[in-house]
Image (spheres, rainbow, N blue to C red):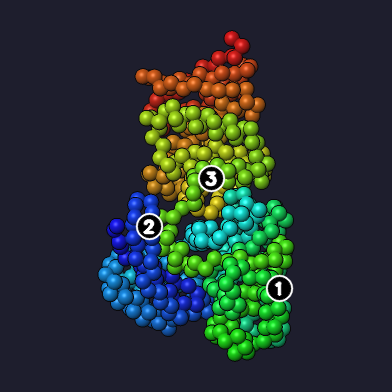
Amino acid sequence: MKTNIFGVVDIGAGSIRCQISEISKKSYTERTIRILEYIVFPLSIGEDTFLKKYITLDTVYKAAGIFEKIKLKFKEYDINGNYKAVCTSAVRDADNKHFFINHIRVKTGIELQIIDTEEELYIKYLGVSETLKGFKKLESKGAVLINLSSGNVGINIRKNKISLFSSTLPYGALRIAQLFSDIEEKIKYRAYEQYINKLVLLLKKNCFEYDKINSVIGSDTSTGLLLEIFKTKNNFFDILDLVNLYSRVKTLSAAEISLELSIKDYESKILKPVLYLYISIMKSTGAKKLYFSDQNFSDQLTRFYLAKTKEKKFNKKLKEYFFYYGKRYNLDEKHAKQVLLFCEKMRRSLKNILIIKTDEKIVLTGAAILHDIGYYTNINDHQEYSNKIINSLNIPGLDREILENIGLCSLFHGSGERRASETVYYNLSPERELTIKKIVSILKIADALDASHMQLIKDIAIEALDKFVKITAVSSATPFLEIKYFKLKSKDFLETFGIPVELYVKLDYE
């Protein structure tokens, strides 16, 4: 059994956390993780960022001192470069974040990485899904996953293994406390409630199946704080206990809360926003219990980056995601399925010519399904709006660049003057531009073969001959529109792959 030592550093809003783990590899897919050391260095970077919009020089110097200690710890365990050090909202949202990262690198040699909100939310979702008992049942019936940290709140609303809504919003507990720091303590809770009620209204408005959700799952330091207070042996908190605690502390000052509950000063500052945010979302869904996972973010980071944890059958689920989001924009599902069918047949039949990589296959699937959703906004220039809508989507676990590529392919799939070669104006790398050209070339042909949106062409057969690619289409009637658009849209294929493609129509009654 091979073993290895891996370090994770999480730079949060209230502390810098360092976890050293021993990884034992039993097989190619099975790993065990044993925590050797977990150290928390208190440092309120978030108090700088959320109030001043920048990290003060004094805080930068204090952080450098902490990283000097972490550097010694890495040396003690002989970690070398076998670590990940990630920054979340406290650094990510700071105007001088690059100065902060550069200062730490120069002083200690430790490289910091800013993790974007989508990846952070996805890592936390995976951690909860793997460690919370009964998660699959809760998810299948509809659940709100809340990752409430000091800076932001990540909301992932799921039902039947599909993410109905996913976003990270500026409703972190410390951020809320800082926002209303100038209000009299006895009435401050009213400001918290108004602000958090706005969040609930946003969720109801932007998740059109919100009324079907009936479970709430919490994670991150906020549930750790509640666990410290309630000391429950279950994997949930009862809403009545949360409501009673909130009633007890809502008019108290942070100092009074700290004394009353024997918790740290920092925890007493954020307790009221934490409690009311959970209570308000639970009441809006009718949930009676707040379920939680006791796995911390450092554990989740270790598993994600080292054990390569990923949602099971994620690529297959993506098709369901694309159709789900398409339906929100009145997707012509029959046309989308037909275009996807033709794209897949071309990909499989011409694999030696096309050489479609895994990520490109995802782009092809997404573009085949979503290329026309811009009709929902504007009929005359739907490609532009398809691109905009696709770029506005947030699919947990899907790289932003892949989603942008799907948008660009949708932008260029029409029969007008705009060509895939125009991607050069988007300052893309040569590799990425080639991906767009390849997918657009396939998509244009597949889309042309159902140009009428009437599915006249029932099936196609594809042959790669010496001098051209032959597509034989079986149709129930002469597909005049499909033939016309095929001639207009097949030029990209020749320009990209260097071989022409020709269409032969066979009527199914012949």
Q: Which amino acid type is marked by label 1?
A: Leu
N-terminal label among 2 and 1 = 2
Q: CA distance from mark 1 to mark 3?
A: 38 Å
Name of the residue lying farthest toward the front: 233
**Residue that appears at 53% across and 45% down:** 318
**Residue that appears at 52% across and 39% down:** 365
Image quadrant containing the C terminus: top right
Residue 265 in view in this figure: yes
Element under label 3?
A: helix
Mark 1 and 3 residues: CB-CB less than 8 Å, in contact? Answer: no
**Residue that appears at 39% across and 69% down:** 35
Q: Give the vertical position of 192 relative to 113 (above or below).
A: below
Q: Which residue position holds label 2? A: 31
Q: CA distance from mark 3 to mark 2?
A: 26 Å
Label for residue 61?
Answer: none
Label for residue 240?
Answer: 1
N-terminal label among 1 and 3 = 1
Place residue 17 in its image quadrant: bottom left
Element under label 1?
A: helix
Q: Which amino acid type is marked by label 2?
A: Arg
Label for residue 318?
Answer: 3
341 or 214, nearer to the observer: 214
Viewer-nearest of discs 3 and 2: 2
74 or 425, nearer to the observer: 74
**Residue that appears at 53% across and 58% down:** 129
Name the side, left or right, on which 370 lies relative to 245: left
In the image, residue 107 lies at what x, y percent?
Answer: 31, 76
In the image, residue 489 lies at what x, y percent?
Answer: 52, 29
